[in-house]
Image: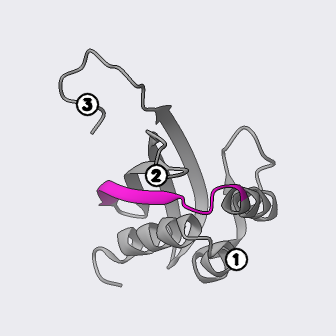
Amino acid sequence: MNQNENKESAISFLQMVASGKIREAFERHIAPGFRHHNPYFRGDAESLMLAMEDNAVQSTNKTLEVKHALEDGNTVAVHSHIKQNPEDLGAAVIHIFRFEGEKIVELWDVGQVIPEESSNEHGVF
């Protein structure tokens, strides 16, 4: 396995999901026994996949722009700008992936909605 293979897989997973290829993303990148830590859904692959499919139907113009991706051993963190549609200011989201071999076995995500006005001159990115 090359040094950045997990990072490339994590980014591929997110890009596929954002483009509506949810089932293909899960088949290609998610390991049996996968678990996630999103508090709004059960912690299994099926519930997360169904929620992502529902979101894809509601947000057909979703975009994901990767800003940073870091790999440390079997852990990858991806910092992205996700917009549900072109007019949406979007959110800054960090996905943390844990890999076993070449497959994702665990996922955490945290997000911050981008405000219309901010006193921070540097912005969220």
- The range drawn in magenta is 58-71
* Closer to the camera in the image, 72 or 124: 124
Tell which tag, 1 or 2, sits nearer the viewer. Answer: 2
Label 1 vs 2, first from the N-terminus? 1
Density class for disc 3 (Cα within 10 Å; few <14, some 14-19, many ≥20) is few
Label 3 vs 2, first from the N-terminus? 2
Residue 51, given in percent of the width and then of the height, sits at 76, 56
Q: Name the residue under label 3.
A: 123
Residue 76 visible:
no
Whether 78 is drawn above or below 41: the answer is: below
79 horizontally vs 91: left or right: left
Residue 69 forms part of the magenta stretch:
yes
Q: Mark 1 points at which residue?
A: 23
Q: Which residue is drawn at 60% across and 83% down?
A: 28
Q: Are marks 3 and 1 in contact (CB under 8 Å)?
A: no
Check disc 3 and report its element: helix, strand or loop: loop
Density class for disc 2 (Cα within 10 Å; few <14, some 14-19, many ≥20) is few
Whether 17 is drawn above or below 85: the answer is: below
Label 3 vs 1, first from the N-terminus? 1
Q: Which residue is drawn at 70% across and 77% down?
A: 23
Q: Mark 2 points at which residue?
A: 86
Residue 117, given in percent of the width and then of the height, sits at 35, 20
Q: Where, by quadrant of the figure, is residue 2 drawn?
A: bottom left
Residue 47 visible:
yes
Task: Give the Cα distance between marks 3 and 1.
Answer: 34 Å
